[in-house]
Amino acid sequence: MAKLVAFYSRAGENYFGGEKRYVKVGNTEKVARMIAEAAGADLFRIEQKEPYAADYATCVEQAKKDFLEQARPEILGNPESMGQYDEIYLGFPSYCGTMPMAVFTFLEKYDWTGKKIYPFVTHEGSGFGRSEKDLGTVCAGAEIGTGLSIVGSKADDAGAEVERWLTIL
């Protein structure tokens, strides 16, 4: 059976330990690519049809509004089937103490029974929040494995941490 790294990430203005700066590649995508390479996994980017703003403050307001409304933003494309995957590495930044609402959109499209899901999150201090609990609820029937929490501003240097994580799974 194959492995899949599915991730949500955003470029633009991001928060890095007290300051904001623009990045061309989001932190979660950087970690997702490391995992895909090390695990020999396929890569799938979860993208919103209407992306949040590149400006950090505006993005936060948009994400908060979607969270409060429990919105399910439309996403671009989906893997046709999850049938060929038995292990899924699911990555996302911490939004409002959980996963971005677009990740919920993605997850709710599939039956996760019998799958192993290994979550990984990028953040600047909030860690997983309640996302692991939410993941267990949305992905009923899946086994939720040990997660990996990476401080987003350290994503570029997370290779060794990714390798250690993969060896314990």
Image (cartoon, rainbow, N blue to C red):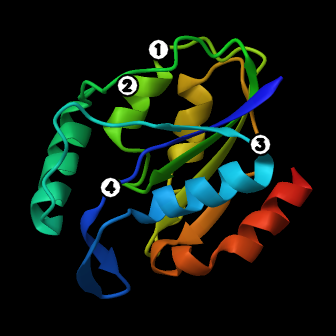
**Helix, strand or loop at disc 4?**
loop
Marks 2/4 in contact by CB < 8 Å: the verdict is no
Pointer 1 residue = 109
Q: Please give left or right for residue 133 compared with residue 9 in the image.
A: right
The amino acid beneath tag 1 is: Lys
Q: Earlier in the sequence, mark 3 or mark 2?
A: 2
10 Å crowding of disc 3: few (<14), some (14-19), many (20+): some
**Helix, strand or loop at disc 2?**
helix
Pointer 4 residue = 10
The amino acid beneath tag 3 is: Gly
Q: Looking at this rendering, what residue extends furthest in the bottom direction? A: 18
| Alpha carbon distance from label 1 to label 3 | 20 Å
| Alpha carbon distance from label 2 to label 1 | 7 Å
Q: Earlier in the sequence, mark 3 or mark 4?
A: 4
Q: Is residue 161 above or below residue 47?
A: below
The x, y position of residue 10, in whole percent, is 32, 55
| Alpha carbon distance from label 3 to label 4 | 25 Å
| Alpha carbon distance from label 2 to label 4 | 16 Å
| Alpha carbon distance from label 4 to label 1 | 22 Å
Q: Earlier in the sequence, mark 2 or mark 4?
A: 4
Pointer 3 residue = 145
Q: Quadrant of the N terminus?
A: top right
Q: Nearer the viewer, mark 2 or mark 4?
A: 4
Q: Nearer the viewer, residue 13 or 131?
A: 13
